[in-house]
Image (cartoon, helix red, strand yellow):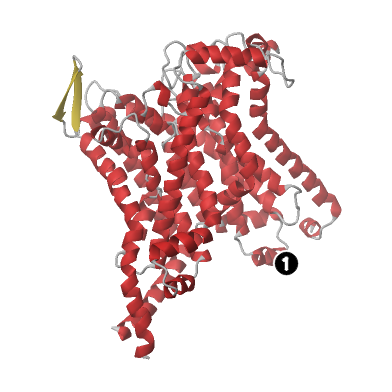
Amino acid sequence: MKAKTGAGGLHGPTGRQRLLRGAVMILLCVISLIPFYLMFVNATRTSNQVQSGLSLVFGNNLMNNIRNFEKAQEGLGITVFKSMFNSFRIAVPYTFLSVYISSLTAYGIHTYRFRGRKLAWGFIMGVMMVPTQVFAIGFYQFMIKLNLIDTYWPLIIPGMTTPAVVFFMKQYLEGALSLEIVEAARIDGSGEFHTFNTIVVPLMKPAIATQAIFQFVASWNNLFMPTLIISTSGKKTLTMFVQMLTSESFRTDYGVVFLGLSITILPMLVMYFILSRFIVEGVSLGGVKE
Amino acid sequence: MKNKKKPPGRKSVSYSRYGYLFIAPFFIAYLIFSLWPLLSTFYYSLFEYTTRNLRTTISFAGLKNYLSVLGISEGERGYFLTYLGNTLRLWIFNFIPQIILSLLAAAWLTDNRVKLKGGGLYKVMIYMPNIITAASISLLFCALLSKYGPIMSMLRSWGWIGENTDIMLSKWGTGISISMILFWMWYGNTTLLLIAGMIGINPSLYEAADLDGCNGRQKFFKITLPLLKPVLLYVLVTSVIGGLQLYDIPALFNVGQGTGYMGGPNDTSTTVTMYIMRLHTTDTGRAAAVSVLLFLITLAVSLLFFRVFSGSEEYEKAKRERRRRRAGRKGGGSSEG
């Protein structure tokens, strides 16, 4: 009986539900934000203030913290901005390789009826779940043999082999590309790769943009592989810089640690709020696997 | 009839070889940079690396590395099992609250009867922690929660915790903190996946249930959950596999002061991948053996998933459909050939 009145849309119970749910959701949003807010606040306070407890009000020690941060940075052999630049230099070609090679592969499997096509697709599905970490030891030894240790190549080349992106691209092509377009291009005398680059890639733009964001983030946030491959201070990536913030010279001054963290997090935070719509959409799309 | 069918057939033959060209870069790169390293990891795991006076000697060891990391051979502690246990403990205390909260949030955000204002904004906000660099997040929480950090200092001044309370010295304090960070980072992602799954459920089922007088709870347990099974399994498997590779958060959260030793206190937050990283500079053989064991566990989890999934009705239906279509095509093909 009660359920029926609820379903009928009587204002009382539904309204209360809405209020409760809205309050919980807003609380969750606050929980998402609060650690970052505390980080920015503490970046502007002195170490003593940080140690005396929480505050939601910004302090006035920011300039001092910046000076101390720069001083502490000198011992590391790399600055935070240099490490960011290094991460960027790796993430851009990695992302480009990932989306381009994956699109090529997905298009090849989607468009052409060649022998072994099913097998190729099965292989991609099969290796999608194999994580990099399980063959990192073999990869490392192989890179030693190729003399590529302490270069960026071992961090960029794996962009060519991202089966999950191939999977996503093929799903997208199935909905977005009709083979008649390809046929029409052939009649117009367009070569196969020319067709791909001038007709198919523009068609795939939304999918490429989404996946590019995720691949860029994946490369930017990666800690495991750079730790394995890079040893020279000047070549370290942003995540490796963050790891160095755990060292003694930083730990003694809390204000400086929070400032360092703020600098490493801010670019991602800004990027997220600019691109959040695509990102949230992309996550939802990736999940619709069946 | 024959004339009509011939041209497309001929065309597909002449163009089909391009397929190989398009897929070649991926497959060549995969064979060289992933499959070969994987096979060589198997190979390295069979050798013993002993370093004396800066010289490393390599000798065939059979399964010795496996026996020692599993603690089967004499005088060896089974570090692999300990660290695997740590990894699973950190994962499970993140996953249970994560799936509960995600189901609830997803059900609320897709409920048409109680429409929430600003659904898009909620999604953006709860997903946000997932995209931020995990290494930075780990260190952020480490700084916030360390003994003289702001949160602990405040609780101490309120008299809520003792003078010497330090979660960095407590196995469960550290473990639960790491699990909560993971939970906080990942529930938004899971919620978005579940929302996508829930939107895919045919709305007429809910209308029929409404007519039969079902309440919200009945609809959730009798319609939403059963039909969400594939998505739930997908979430579970990706979460387990991701959890098994757990590295960034525990590697930075509890680093011993002065020693720089990760995974404190007393290695209780050391994960399998941290173990691989620790071994790799000194003992390639054992590091490889741990990698292979991790690979086998990952493989077992994936296979189990496909097994469970292939038992489900949707899969059977899809399979029947595929078979029917294939039979249809074969019929056409034989008339052509």
Q: Amino acid at mark 1?
A: Leu
* Coordinates of residue A258 in the picture (x, y in percent): 60, 20
**Left or right: A269, with A81 as reference point:** right
Up/down of B218 relative to A25, above or below: below
Residue at 66%, 15% (x, y): give it: A63
* Count of numbered labels shown in the rendering: 1
Question: Residue shown at 72%/63% (left/top)?
Answer: B210
The residue where tag 1 is placed is B211
Measured as percent of width and height from the top left, residue B19 is found at 34, 64
Q: Is residue A123 left or right of residue A246?
A: left
Q: Is residue B83 visible?
A: no
Q: Residue furthest right?
A: A11
Quadrant of residue B292 within the rendered picture:
top left
Chain that bears disc 1: B
Q: Quadrant of residue A205?
A: bottom right
Q: Is residue A231 visible?
A: yes
Q: Position of residue A176 (x, y in %)?
A: 53, 64
Q: Nearer the viewer, residue A109 or A285?
A: A109
Looking at the image, which residue is at 64% across and 16% down? B150
- Seen in the picture, residue B2 relative to B81 is either above or below; the reply is below
On the image, the x and y values in percent for residue A118 come to: 34, 64
Camera-nearest residue between B328 and A12: B328
The answer to whether residue A279 is left or right of residue B43 is right
In-image side of A290 versus A127 (left or right): right
Q: Residue at x 56, y 45 (%)?
A: B190
Asked which secondary structure carries label 1, the reply is: helix
